[in-house]
Every structure is written in C-alpha cells, then in structure tokens.
Amino acid sequence: MQKSVVVNGLGRIGRGIVREILKKENFRLIALNDIYDIDHLVYLLKYDSVHKSSLKVYKKDNETIFINGKEVKYYSSKDLSFLKNIKANLLIECSGVYDKASYFYPFLDKNIDRVLFAFVIKDNTPMFVFEVNHQNYLGEKILSAASCTSTCVTPILKILNDFISIKRVFATTIHSYNADQNLLDSKTDSLDFRKARSSTLNLLPISSGIAYATSRILPFLKGKILGCSVRVPVCDVTAIDLSLEFEQSVDKFNLIEYLKKQTKNSKRILLLNTPFVSSDIISSPYSSIIDLSSIEIIDNFLKIFIWQDNEIGYINALLDTASFILEK
C-alpha cells in the first residue's frame, strides 16, 4: 500500500527527494511547501545542472502542479500552518528552519503520522541511518535521518569496529560547496567569515558536525572521534578521508576480504577495485563507496577514502529509512 508523503523545503535535498521519491512504488507524493513562486519551483524541478532531470512538470494553477502525470498540491506557506490542511503518513522536513521536534507536536496524528528530518537535530530526537541502526527504531513519531556525511561514514565504521575494536578516529570531510557560500567574495551572514570568500576559487576549511552525529548513531565512538571539513570547488560529491587506529594490528588482505563478505548483500555500500574521481560518483544511490585499492595500513593504523554523492546517496538512504519506519 502506498504511503502518502509531504516535503517541506525545496532546496537541493528537497528537490532531490521529489525526483527520487517518484521512482519508489511504495510512496505517493501528495504535497510540497516552500516560499518559491510556483513557476520558479516548476522550473527548478524540471531542470537541474547536476542531476539531469527527466521529470515532466507543469502548473495546473497556483496551488497545483503535475509531476510525471501525478497531481501534487503546492503550498507557499511561510510557516507550518499549511499542515492543518493535510492528512499524510509522513512529512520530510528539509527546510532547516524547523529544527526542533516541538514545532511538529500540534500536527502529529491529526495531520501527519511521522516526521523525518533531513538533517541533524541538536535535541533528543533519535537519529537513524539505514543498515547501521535502523533496526533500533521503536515507533518514534519524530526522527532524523542524520546528515549526508554521517550516513556515508557510519556504515563503514560499524563494520570496521565489528572486525577489530576502534581506538580512535579522525575524519576529514572533503565536501562540495554549499548554497550558504558565495560565488564571489562578498558579505556573509555567517559568523565564519571564510564563507564570505569565493566557493569556486578556494579550498575552505570549516567546522564539521560529523563527530557529534556519528557518536550519536554509534555510541561506542563517543569521545573517540573528531572531524573537520574542507569545502572544495566542485558542485557535488563528498570524499571522507578516514584515519583510524584499531586496538590491535590489522592485516590488509584479511580486512579487505572481511569488507567484501560483510557488504556482499548491502543495499547501501559499494566496494570497487576501479580507480575513479569525484565526477564518476555523481547520481550514485549508494551511501558509501570505497575503492579497495586505496586502502593503506601500517600496523594498527588505517587510511581509507569513502565516497558519496552527498545529494542522491544521502536521499536514497533517507528514503530507505522512511520505507522502514512506515512499514513498522
């Protein structure tokens, strides 16, 4: 039976969810909300500079669009009051504006059954990553699908720790530029003035929440992981440069064979022996992609690169989590 879905916030992730959700037979997209003019939204759904869109989108009126022949209600509400007019199984919150579970309490059960945040929440809202801790879901009505980077790194860290206990980790996220950066040097509203600099001309060191999110999802890493991020002049794809120390020495051949065995039936992890570059990863649906030939080990010290299309890879993991919680 199809589950009805509403998406609030139609930036890169929100629009990506619209495109990917239409490929899933178990979902029915019924409504969208953002402050876009509807003609602007139709244009941005129809065309995309990174992921070539095949959507057929047109406006019926100022409150209705058709996407691939399916009618979808469009609200341009500046708050959550539009939810009073909706009855849906799931709301996917992508705007980033409503970053507390309490915003959605008035609408639970009456209007929406579940809320899934497409970002990390800094309250007690539980976070789930598919194939990592999704089996711990106990019917919570409001939850987070974590972040793109934590979705990328946690599946691998879980498998590695099951092989030999991890002593400590440092993760450097090499991340494509974001919409909160400038194309050219200009004023920024961010407290980090480096975001004022051109995203197309600079490598930009920046703080990262990967340690916080990862230790929430994998509690055994609490106090054992740190991370930072470098924004780079590409429009999509993330690589995580993972340096970790095991509690004991590791044999490279045995580790690779173990990874192959543990990920053989994984829906979210792809292991390759083919050298590739970031553009080869664009539009890949996997959470974590590893070139096995890039693994290096010295005694108990491991260096590994993990790749992800931080839009499509993250979105597909989020939708796998959504499918699971709605079936439960």
Image (cartoon, grey):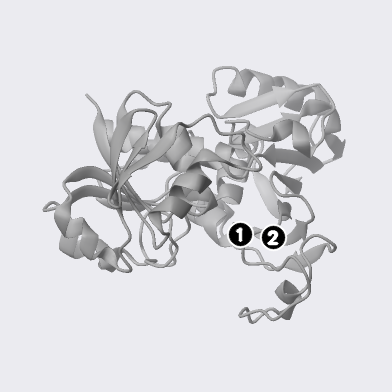
The kind of residue tagged 2 is: Gly
36 and 145: which is toward the camera: 36
Give the label on residue 175, or none. none
In this rendered view, identify the residue nearer to me: 181 or 156. Answer: 181
Is residue 118 in view?
no
Residue at image position (50%, 46%) is 43
Q: Which residue is nearer to you in this view: 281 or 306?
A: 281
Q: Choose top left, top right, bottom left or bottom right for residue 99.
A: bottom left
Quadrant, the N terminus:
top left
Q: Would residue 121 be seen by someone viewing this image from the given angle?
A: yes
- Residue 97, position as x, y percentages in the image: 41, 67
Task: Report the side of 81 relative to 271 (left or right).
Answer: left
Image height check: is 301 above or below 21?
below
- The answer to which image quadrant residue 21 occupies is top left
| CA–CA distance in space, label 1 to label 2 | 6 Å
Q: Is residue 115 above or below residue 279?
A: below
Residue at 62% in and 78% down:
190
Of the 4 image quadrants, the one containing the C terminus is: top left
The three-letter code of the residue at mark 1 reads Ala
Task: Describe the element under mark 2 as helix, strand or loop.
Answer: strand
* Residue that carries the numbered disc 1 in the rendered image: 211
The answer to whether marks 1 and 2 mark residues whose Cβ atoms lie closer than 8 Å is yes
Which of the labelled discs sits on residue 227, or is there none? 2
